[in-house]
Image: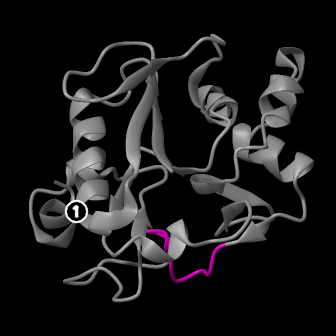
Amino acid sequence: MLIACVRKGDKYSDEYVLKLQRMVRRHLPPEAGCTFVCLTDKHIPGVLCENLTEDLPGWWSKLEVFKLGEPTLYFDLDVVITGNLSPVLEWQGFGIIQDWWMPGFNSSVMRLNGDEEYLLKDFRRDRMSQYYMGDQQWITERMPDAKTFPAHWFPSFKADKCFGPAPPDDALAVIFHGEPKPCHFLSGWVKDKWD
């Protein structure tokens, strides 16, 4: 199985990719045999990189993960992995997060079968302005019946108020959508886990 992320432009530094790679390796069972790959527009030393080819802007670049064509566990760069990832590796079928604030999905973590390439092939650039929530609104429209992960697996730092001395015990990763980002924490569990 692939473990994938997407990094385009300068919003996220190499540090985010390298830290995600380390967090993934720490929380995978040794026998998992997964390969970490970053779809990107620039080389990142120490990371297996695959070129972005569609020249989609910003968050729309995430749609390129659907071209990989094999089982893939996708993470946004602003997640902090906090627990053993075995349950999501064993997940059957496509999986995605139910958004915390509105109807539809949040695409910060996805489990792909490898047969979802149509989500990229069918996308029309001239319709981007219709999707104010970007790629996740497109995915919600095209896959309205997708299975969502158990809510406790991937809590939102803000919506689920993960402000205590430790992340929730049963979380696999905490999602830092919007602000703040993991790099803003100079102490506490976020700093300790985001490494």
Q: Nearer the viewer, residue 71 or 142?
A: 71
User: Helix or strand or loop: what does disc 1 sit on?
Assistant: helix
* Colouring chosen for the image of the structure: one colour
Main SS, magenta residues: loop
Amino acid type assigned to the residue bearing label 1 in the image: Arg
Residue at x 31%, y 14% (from the top left corner): 43
Q: Position of residue 82 (x, y in %)?
A: 30, 71
Quadrant holding the C terminus: bottom left
Q: Residues within 10 Å of mark 1 (few under 14, many from 20)?
A: some
Looking at this view, name the residue that lies furthest to the bottom.
169
**Which residue bears the numbered disc 1?**
26
Q: Is residue 85 above or below residue 71?
A: below
Q: Nearer the viewer, residue 75 or 86?
A: 86
Residue at x 62%, y 71% (from the top left corner): 91
Looking at this view, name the residue that lies furthest to the left.
187
Residue 98 visible: no
Q: Was residue 145 drawn as part of the magenta stretch in this picture?
A: no
Q: Which residues are magenta?
A: 149-159
Residue at x 69%, y 63% (from the top left corner): 95
Q: Is residue 26 left or right of residue 116?
A: left
Q: Position of residue 112 (x, y in %)?
A: 66, 52
Q: Is residue 179 left or right of residue 166?
A: right
Q: Quadrant of residue 133?
A: top right
Q: Is residue 153 above or below residue 191?
A: below
Q: Position of residue 93 (x, y in %)?
A: 74, 64
Q: Was residue 152 drawn as part of the magenta stretch in this picture?
A: yes
Q: How many marks?
A: 1
Q: Position of residue 15 (x, y in %)?
A: 21, 35
Q: Is residue 66 left or right of residue 166?
A: right
Residue 179 visible: yes
